[in-house]
Amino acid sequence: MRKKWNKKPVALAAAALALTASVSVGSALAYFTTYSTASGSVQMDMGFTHTDVEETVDSDGKHVVIANTGDYDCFVRVKVFAEVEVAYEPGDGWSQGDDGYWYYSPVLAAGESTPELLVTYDFPEDGEEFNIIVVQECTPVIFDESGNPQADWNHVVTADSTEQEGE
C-alpha cells in the first residue's frame, strides 16, 4: 500500500528557499556589478641625487668643487689620497672629520656647487710624477623628528634595493 504524499509542506519549503535565495541574490548581484572608472595618469619620478667633482690643477694646487647635478638636495664629503704630503685650504662650509673626510656641512641644493676646497702640495725634489686622487660621496638629505636636515652616510642605494650598511 502506498501512502499518499502531501505536496503542501514540500511546496512551502521550496517557496521559502526560493524567497531566501532571491533576497540574497540582490546584494550579491550588486557586489559583482559595482564598478568604478578612472582616467588620466600621473607620472611619478623618484629621481636620484647625483654629484660631479670638478678638479682643476694649477701652480697653487688642486682645486676641488662638487656640483649637485641630481634632482634632490644632498650632503657631500671628499677624501683625498696622495703619495705626497698635502694640506688643505677649505672654503666656507668645509670642515675636516675624524675619519679623514672633508665635509661640506650646509645642504647642497640641486643645481648648486660647493665653495672650493684647495688641496696644496709640494712637488718632489726629484721631479718624479705622482697622483692626487679625489673621492667624493653624496647622500640624500633626511630629516629627523624635529624637521632638521641630517646626513646618513651608512645608507646605501642600489638600482635594485635600498639597505643599511652592516645589516
Image: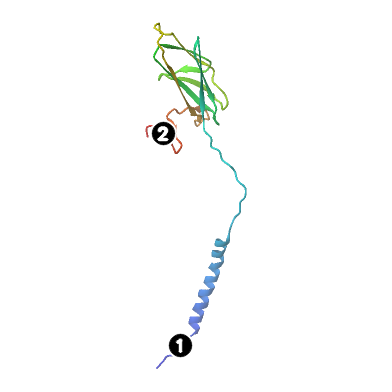
Q: Amino acid at mark 1?
A: Trp
Front position in the image: 91 or 25: 91
* Tags 1 and 2 touching, CB below 8 Å: no
- Residue at the image position 50 percent from the left and 20 percent from the top: 104
* Few, some or many residues within 10 Å of mark 1 (<14, 14–19, 20+): few
Color scheme of the displayed model = rainbow
| Helix, strand or loop under label 1 | loop
Q: Amino acid at mark 2?
A: Gln
Residue closest to the far bottom: 1
Quarter of the figure with the N terminus: bottom left
Spot occupied by residue 117 in the image (x, y as percentages of width and height): 50, 16
The residue under label 2 is 164
- Residue at the image position 49 percent from the left and 24 percent from the top: 76
Front position in the image: 98 or 139: 139
Q: Quadrant of residue 110?
A: top right
- Residue at the image position 56 percent from the left and 40 percent from the top: 44
Question: In front of the other: label 1 or label 2?
Answer: 2
Residue closest to the far right: 40
